Image: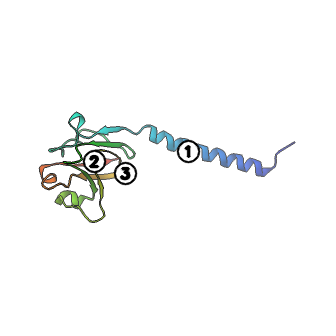
Amino acid sequence: MSQGRGSASRTAAAAALMLIYLLAQAEYARAATYTVGGSSGWTFNMASWPQGKTFRAGDTLIFKYDRTLHNVVALDKGSYDSCRTPVGAKVYNSGNDRIRLAKGPNYFICNFPGHCESAMKIAVNAA
């Protein structure tokens, strides 16, 4: 029994969807994971930590810290520069936060009093 044109269209559409899915999965498979601060974890004087590293959208940063002493806040450049947390900023406080990088600049600080001012902050640009 032969198949009609409708079957061929559905087969082509299914193949195209499968290709798009596989390409998306390949992008995530190439994503890297970085522990911020290495073995010392998220702490003071972190601003230079990203230097010399290449980041891509979809890479994951892991922030490890004592949650009674620190946190991680994702914010915009102005707030990063001023060390001020805007209303609505995403605050992480698990002590083991996994944050996926968005394409472009990504800014993070600790907003405990005086911590951002002591360079407990990083700016990461993801290609």
Q: Secondary structure at mark 2?
A: strand
Q: x, y percentage for residue 78?
A: 22, 61
Q: Secondary structure at mark 1?
A: helix
Determine crowd level at label 2: few under 14, some 14-19, many 20+ residues with C-alpha closer than 10 A: many
**Residue 117 to residue 23: above or below:** below
Question: Which mark is drawn over residue 73?
Answer: none
In percent of the image, x 18 and y 58: which residue is there?
83
Q: x, y percentage for residue 59?
A: 37, 43
Question: Which mark is drawn over residue 124?
Answer: 2
Of marks 2 and 1, which one's residue comes earlier in the chain?
1
Q: Is residue 32 left or right of residue 112?
A: right
In percent of the image, x 45 and y 37: which residue is there?
29
Q: CA distance from mark 3 to mark 2?
A: 10 Å
**In the foreground, 110 or 53:** 110
Q: Are marks 3 and 2 in contact (CB under 8 Å)?
A: no
In percent of the image, x 31 and y 38: which residue is there?
34
Q: CA distance from mark 3 to mark 1?
A: 20 Å
Q: Are marks 2 and 1 in contact (CB under 8 Å)?
A: no
Q: Is residue 26 left or right of residue 60?
A: right
Q: Give the amino acid at mark 1.
A: Tyr
Determine crowd level at label 3: few under 14, some 14-19, many 20+ residues with C-alpha closer than 10 A: some
Q: Which residue is mark 3?
A: 102
Q: Which residue is mark 1?
A: 21
Q: Give the amino acid at mark 3.
A: Ala
**In the foreground, 55 or 59:** 59
Determine crowd level at label 1: few under 14, some 14-19, many 20+ residues with C-alpha closer than 10 A: few
